[in-house]
């Protein structure tokens, strides 16, 4: 019943969907040159043979797909891989990093005509969906076309679980469409089973398999040269409200470290101008990276409002606070700085990464602070006692390297399913 109403709404609401897409296009949220892909009308042909379709919402999911894609296309008689995502940023990342044998497309808008266009053109043989983006038309129609589906790296945050419990039959319809759910944690297993998923296994977090974020070594050397020997720390992937907290930390810590350099890398770089204005109004001397403003001896805050450079700043700053965690928004991935040797700090709101956070804390590789003052105290201590910060960084790195075996476990688990799908295709008349 709910699915029928949803399909009716997305069909009748086609003009509204079109208006919404046009607004996104004007704001740069859609790619004008590839807009037809959002309508399920690609401009490239389907490759011949076996096609594996992988879908992830945005950058985080895209990154965790890359090791799996590399493993699949390296196999003998490798199938083609179709990767779909929904954001311009993830499309740019895929263009730069997809191996030969893999294709990127924008996921179609979840209106039935667009979904049918997409499936009729690509005819995938297996579908791997990453994490928790559940589009009803796309999922149910893929299932109706007898395409095996696996939900990979599946997670269910407490807010999402609470929402889905209100629509339990609908959740059961969607999750029951998946032949297998590979969940990140035991808690996720319990939540998916409670919502009606048929076959759920704990696999671990595929983000551990992602290689360390890249960086341009020349740029790193240049910024290090400009920063000199100044003590520094990084507030990474910050959300609204956390830039003010970073300034508070700077003002507190600079009393003991007058040459302190604070780096802020907002999660959404398009907020850069707004953040710079706020910081300057509060008396901070700010250098903005997107404006090519260099670090000078007077720079207090270096605003790293660019895309794709977190690997650079994780290597630069020995102490990293991961944002979205001192505001109630669910936290960010702490694995990335851990892989690059940072002493990592997070706030108390990390429910999107519950298990990772607890495991890293248990391994002495992560510190959790409760508020702005707690963060200021932690940064001040780490700068004053570098051996303490280094020990935490080394523990985090050991933990991340140990957990990276999840890729091998994952490939062992899904290879028989991929092989079975290929044998089924060969057997068809």
Image (cartoon, helix red, strand yellow):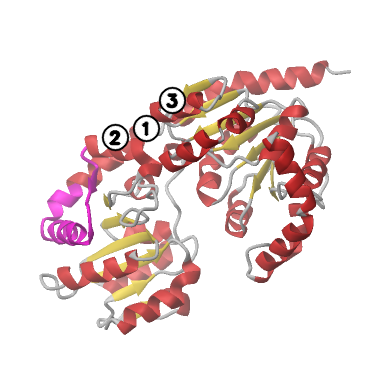
- The residue at the point 27 percent across, 66 percent down is 245
Mark 2, other Cα within 10 Å: few <14 / some 14–19 / many ≥20: some
| Majority SS type along the magenta span | helix
Query: What label sits on residue 190 in the rendered view?
Result: 3
> Decide: marks 2, 1 in contact (CB < 8 A)?
yes
Is residue 294 visible to the viewer in this orientation of the structure?
Answer: no
Does 374 lie within the magenta span? yes
> Which residues are the magenta region?
363-390
Image coordinates for residue 228, horizontal then vertical, percent: 25, 72
> Decide: marks 1, 3 in contact (CB < 8 A)?
no
User: Which is closer to the viewer, label 2 or label 1?
Assistant: 2
Residue ID for mark 1: 403
Does 289 lie within the magenta span? no
Left or right placement of residue 280 versus residue 118 in this view: left
Query: Relative to residue 346, is residue 283 depicted above or below?
Result: below
Image coordinates for residue 227, horizontal then vertical, percent: 28, 72
Question: Does label 1 or label 3 sit earlier along the sequence?
Answer: 3
Find numbered disc 1 in the image and state the secondary structure of the residue it sits on.
Answer: helix
> Decide: marks 2, 3 in contact (CB < 8 A)?
no
Which of the image's four quarters has the C terminus?
top right
Residue ID for mark 2: 359
Left or right placement of residue 317 versus residue 364 in this view: right
Find numbered disc 3 in the image and state the secondary structure of the residue it sits on.
Answer: helix
Image coordinates for residue 116, horizontal then vertical, percent: 81, 41
Left or right placement of residue 270 versus residue 98 in this view: left
Query: Relative to residue 305, is residue 421 depicted above or below?
Result: above
């Amino acid at each position: 019943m709910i699915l029928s109403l949803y399909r009716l709404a997305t069909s009748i609401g086609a003009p509204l969907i079109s208006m919404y897409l046009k607004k996104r296009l004007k704001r740069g949220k859609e790619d004008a040159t590839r807009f037809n892909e959002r309508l399920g009308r690609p401009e490239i042909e389907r490759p011949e043979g076996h096609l594996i379709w992988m879908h992830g919402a945005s950058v985080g999911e895209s990154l965790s797909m890359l090791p799996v894609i590399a493993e699949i296309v390296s196999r003998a008689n490798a199938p083609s891989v179709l990767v779909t995502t929904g954001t311009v940023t993830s499309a740019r990342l895929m263009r730069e990093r997809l191996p030969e044998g893999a294709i990127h497309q924008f996921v179609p808008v979840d209106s039935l005509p667009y979904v049918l266009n997409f499936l009729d053109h690509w005819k995938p043989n297996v579908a791997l969906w990453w994490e928790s983006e559940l589009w009803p038309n796309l999922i149910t129609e893929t299932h109706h076309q007898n395409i095996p589906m696996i939900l990979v790296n599946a997670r269910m945050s407490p807010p999402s679980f609470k929402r889905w419990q209100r629509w339990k039959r609908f959740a059961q319809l969607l999750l029951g469409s998946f032949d297998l759910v590979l969940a990140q944690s035991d808690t996720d297993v319990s939540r998916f089973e409670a919502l009606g998923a048929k076959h759920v296994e704990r696999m671990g977090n595929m983000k551990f398999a992602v290689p360390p974020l890249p960086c341009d070594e020349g740029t790193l050397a240049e910024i290090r040269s400009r920063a000199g020997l100044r003590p520094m720390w990084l507030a990474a992937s910050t959300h609204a409200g956390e830039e003010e907290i970073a300034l508070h930390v700077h003002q507190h810590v600079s009393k003991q470290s007058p040459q302190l350099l604070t780096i802020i890398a907002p999660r959404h770089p398009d907020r850069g101008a707004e953040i710079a204005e706020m910081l300057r109004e509060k008396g901070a001397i700010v250098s903005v990276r997107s404006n090519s403003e260099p670090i000078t001896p007077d720079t207090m805050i270096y605003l790293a409002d660019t895309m794709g450079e977190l690997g650079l700043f994780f290597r630069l700053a020995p102490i990293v606070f991961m944002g979205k965690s001192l505001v109630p928004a669910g936290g960010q991935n702490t694995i990335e700085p851990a892989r690059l040797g940072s002493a990592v700090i997070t706030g108390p709101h990390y429910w999107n990464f519950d298990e990772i956070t607890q495991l890293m804390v248990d391994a002495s590789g992560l510190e959790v602070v409760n508020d702005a003052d707690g963060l200021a105290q932690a940064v001040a201590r780490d700068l004053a006692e570098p051996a303490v910060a280094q020990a935490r960084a080394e523990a985090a790195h050991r933990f991340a390297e140990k957990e990276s075996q999840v890729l091998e476990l994952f490939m062992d688990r899904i290879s028989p399913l991929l092989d079975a799908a290929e044998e089924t295709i060969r057997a068809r008349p």
